[in-house]
Image (spheres, rainbow, N blue to C red):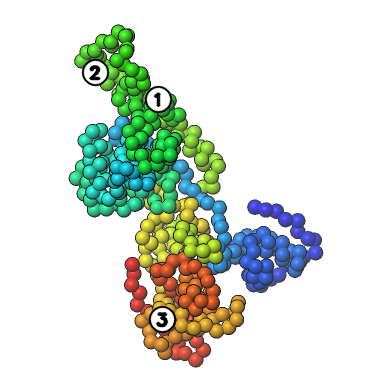
Amino acid sequence: MPTYKVPTDVLTPPEEDRPKELEDAHHEIGHAGAEHIVRYLQHTKGMHWNTILQDAVELVKSCPGCQKFNIAKKGFHPLRPIYSYIPGDHWAIDLATFDTSTSGNNFMLVMVDVCTRFCILRAIPDKSADTLVRTMKQIFCDFGIPRVIQSDNGTEFKNSLMKKLVNSLGINHRLTTPYHPRANGTAERWVQSAVQVIKKKLEGASRDWDYHVPLTQLQLNMRISKRLQSSPFSLMYARDVNAFRDYRKDTSTPATPMSYEELVNRLEHMQKVVFPALKERTDAYVKNQKEQFDSTHQLTSFPEQSHVMAKVHTRGSKLAPVYEGPYTVLHKTEGGSYILQDETGALMPRDYAPSELKLISVKDVVSTDDLYEVQAIIDHRGDEGHREYLVRWKGYTPEDDTWQLPEDFTDPDFIQQYWKRRGEKQHDVAHNTKRATSYKRKARGQSTGQRRSKRNKQ
């Protein structure tokens, strides 16, 4: 928390006047942050009280404009490494996209065994559910049926055909949180490594990329893993890979065939010695990795029923809001993501990672009975900075149109769309299809009876 040198001759306003002084200062210096507000009140108006900084922070957190545009430091939940101690038991899956090859392939399926880091690469023509399921079924027949597979939420992995496959085989399919690539970091890293190797082999012939996929798989599996201190190939097959040389000219004495007892002993050695040692090495590695991550990242937890803003990932322009909301936190999932609820009580269609959220302060939680759905903005009046908008309410007649202030709208998209249609301001619309609501305030002289519009919950 910053410290300040407090002037000796200061005015301490009454407690009931402090919120207005803070709010006036906040607006007078252009929606500045808490530290600017404190300095402004101290040096310009000679005001100070013991909790001035904390009060200023709460004010900024509750300001609707600042909630949408202020960039918050990313928050993270503690690192939760993914474990697997048996080869072929848990696969991480992802796709890499390429230009169409001479063979008609456009994608590369990447599967990584979490235990051994053994990777499987397959060039495929498309990412349809049928193609992926057919390819994965062949791999499962070669390496055995896993207990767990993990992937992102892409439609190529989240569909009825994939669901039928995992249900029929009894596989636990874990889907990671959208916009949170770290959750499927194992597959993401191997995608990057595979693409880098293939790029270096192309020599300008970019349409031949799928020709290099099989050798790239072998070369990646020959690398000594920093995490495991062994090659994925040797851990998966319990032997070293054959060296690249011409065995037709090899004059060395052929290796003696292994007896049945020797094969059994090798298998027991892998199960009783190698994999237990691998577990200890993995535990030590990820413990160190977790400690480093937790020490360098701001760890954040959002309490249930707290209010947050969610980051907008597809902004239409630089002037569009960085965050949208507010939303209410319902609860935290086992994976560390959050389930949110909008102001109408509807659940958001996906979960959110902590790095997408920022905590805000909502002083007055508006009842859903006071929320009405906007059909369109019909007209405006007033000059810049003093606008009002004539609103047509969904489910109501033109006689119910009312003039509303910009701060009455819970979402600015309808205002942006209105100006875009008029052609007076060329702002891109960040979310054309999003539903907007507003606080419908009674105009002077209207009846005091309240009516609530019908809303179609998604």
- Residue under pointer 2: 264
Residue under the image location 43 percent in, 36 percent down: 203
Q: Position of residue 303 (x, y in %)?
A: 46, 56
Which mark is on residue 393? 3
* Kind of residue at badge 3: Trp
Q: Is tag 2's residue or tag 3's residue first in the polypeptide sequence?
A: 2
* Kind of residue at badge 2: Val
Q: Mark 1 and mark 3: span between their CA atoms? A: 66 Å
Q: Would you place residue 442 above or below residue 155 in this image? A: below
Secondary structure beneath dot 2 equals helix
Q: Residues within 10 Å of mark 1 (few under 14, many from 20)?
A: some
Between residue 109 and residue 291, name the one nearer to us.
109
* Kind of residue at badge 1: Ser
Q: Would you place residue 44 above or below residue 117 in this image? A: below
Secondary structure beneath dot 1 equals loop
Q: Residues within 10 Å of mark 2 (few under 14, many from 20)?
A: few
Q: Mark 2 and mark 3: span between their CA atoms? A: 77 Å
